[in-house]
Amino acid sequence: SDWIKIRSDDGFMFLIPRKAANCSGFLRGMLDSRCGFMESTSNTCQLIVDVRRAVVTEKVMEYLVFKAQYEKAGPGEDIPDFTERIVPELALETLMAADYLEA
């Protein structure tokens, strides 16, 4: 499937393109069929360890989509500053979640 479901621990569901999910080393491993994880057949990843709140999950998924969109940008291409999209109250929690997901 070209879309992956990401479920936060508090029950919210997010759909992101597989290309964006593959920008996360953690999600890429879960979705790799050679690893034999259930997530690779269901195309659904449950985040229960360090990414619990939907508001943080949403911001990290937004970053993965942003990263996938601009990963092949040329040196002269204007890339917007993603940090402007993160409210200060969520900055540390978002950073920790992104680090956990190897984003």
Image (cartoon, grey):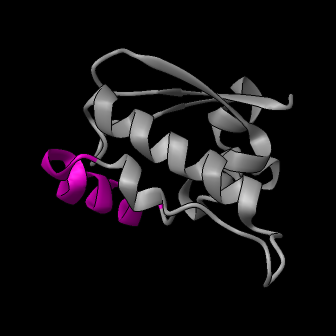
Q: From the viewer's perspective, is 20 left or right of 12?
A: right
In the rendered image, residue 70, in percent from the top left (x then y), is placed at: 73, 62
In the rendered image, residue 91, in percent from the top left (x then y), is placed at: 23, 55
- In the image, residue 1 sits, relative to residue 18, either above or below, namely above
- Looking at the rendered image, the quarter that the N terminus falls into is top right
Q: Is residue 47 visible?
A: no
Identify the residue at image location x=26%, y=35%. Answer: 52
Q: From the viewer's perspective, is 20 left or right of 91?
A: right
Identify the residue at image location x=59%, y=58%. Answer: 24
Majority SS type along the magenta span: helix
Labels in figure, total: 0
- In the image, residue 64 sits, relative to residue 25, either above or below, namely above
Could you say which is closer to the camera, residue 64 or residue 8? 64
Q: Is residue 77 visible?
A: yes
Q: From the viewer's perspective, is 77 left or right of 84?
A: right
* Quadrant position of residue 4: top right
Could you say which is closer to the camera, residue 24 or residue 32? 24
- The residue sitting at the bottom extreme is 75
Q: Which residues are magenta?
A: 87-101
* Quadrant position of residue 39: top right
Identify the residue at image location x=27%, y=20%. Answer: 10
- The residue sitting at the left extreme is 89
Could you say which is closer to the camera, residue 100 or residue 14? 14
Could you say which is closer to the camera, residue 42 or residue 67? 67
Say if the magenta span includes residue 90.
yes
In the rendered image, residue 17, in percent from the top left (x then y), is placed at: 75, 36
- In the image, residue 80 sits, relative to residue 48, either above or below, namely below
Identify the residue at image location x=39%, y=47%. Answer: 85
In the rendered image, residue 26, in percent from the top left (x then y), is placed at: 54, 58
- In the image, residue 60 sits, relative to residue 74, either above or below, namely above
